[in-house]
Amino acid sequence: MSNQETVVSALERRIDMSVPLADIEKDVEARLKQMARTVKMPGFRPGKVPFRMVAQSYGPQARSEAIGAAVERVLGEQIRAQNLRIAGYPNIEPKEAAGAEALEFTAVFEVYPEIAIADVSAHEVERPLLEVGDAEVDKTLEVLRKQRTTFVPIERAAQDGDRVVVDFTGRKDGVEFEGGKATDFPFVIGAGQMLKDFETAVLGLNAGEVKTFDMTFPADYHATHLAGQTVQFEVVLKKVEEPKLPEIDSEFAKSLGIADGDVAKMREEVKGNLEREVKRRIQAKVKERVMNVLIETHPIDVPKALVEQESRQLAENAKKDFEARGMQTKDLPIDASWFAEQAARRVKLGLIMSELVKSKDLQAKPEQIRATIEDFAASYEDPSEVVSWYYSQPQRLAQAEALVIEDNVVAWVVGNAKTTDKATSFDDLMGNAA
């Protein structure tokens, strides 16, 4: 048998293989003899079926297996000889027979790219700085208060922030339109549940008042039959309720899980949780910049087979996410090609990080994994139970290990690049609207 490797592109390879027919026939005969020992046929005891009948019934199967084994063996020998790292599965293409003494095939496959770890010292990584103090705790408590807002009836005109209950009827050219009518409909003025012009029309009304007004829907309104159309609404205001925020007292502390209602203890717990969240967000921003640096400094080609595989996985994850949200995905077309760009980036980063971990000895150490899991568990009521949960299954532990490896890669880049610290505001870091 003979073989010859051809470089098609940066990553694609072709190997022409020639397998002697004599070797295949010898393997076919050996396989049939093995089958003959146990094969069953009507009228014969197991193992007593004539070899001719076994060959007639099972010959095609044996030949197919023999050819597959021969191709796999030859390809494997060539891959080991050339020290090739195959990405995905080879595509085996039969060739036109050059003679009667051999079967010829071509294996087409991709290899992993060769990656040399680049110098990152000229690249900059900006690291946000934020110290959690009383002001940040106060802002967080204010958010928690707003989440627990209640509404109480009030005898006055509706204001911004009030919850109102209305009946309304919408008409276009004097005719009621679909979706334009409701009874006892509640909404908070300024919360964005209704269009701005609708909310503005309700402002200043008292309970029992009726108002008729014209309103034009936005050109990009989701209901296409109303987009850009001018209609008329009649609104009856039935109830006005003003917001009431809870006081920051012992009852509020208890609602946050502080059993004895100690407000000082509540503030300390909020501060501790906030510090952990701030730390995670800073790490996430630094990690994002580090990953960009790795992409910028390692312009490598990636195997199409791996990108396609990752695209399919991302599509499947998207489908599962839709299902988890209660959506029916049976007839929902989710094309893997939609995720090709994201998949290519993920594959590229995975290959670069893998080489970086190997060449710079950045594997996760047991004590790092333990510290990461304990950090996860710290915000739970019983941290020891969460730690045991992670260590009870290898898959969960592997997830923590992967995060530690990512952290090690980030630390290496930060340690070797130009790192600058920049003070950031609480609102910017947390993504709060101005």
Image: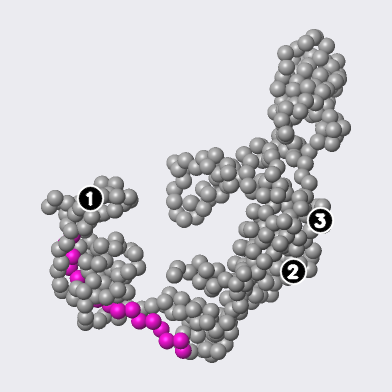
Q: Residue at x 65, y 69 (%)?
A: 421
Mark on residue 370?
A: 2
User: What is the chief secondary structure element of the magenta stretch?
Assistant: strand
Residue type highlighted by circle 1? Gln
Part of the protein shown in magenta:
233-249
* SS at mark 1 in the image: loop
Mark on residue 360?
A: 3
Q: Is residue 416 left or right of residue 124?
A: right
At which x and y percent is residue 95?
73, 17
* SS at mark 3 in the image: helix
Work out whether mark 2 precedes mark 1 in sequence or the reverse, and give the earlier one.
1
> Residue 284 sits in which quadrant?
bottom right
> Residue 44 sits in which quadrant?
top right
- Residue that label 1 marks: 229
| Residue nearer the viewer, 372 or 124 | 124
Work out whether mark 3 precedes mark 2 in sequence or the reverse, and give the earlier one.
3
Q: Quadrant of the N terminus?
A: top right
At which x and y percent is residue 401?
73, 60
Q: Residue at x 60, y 72 (%)?
A: 423
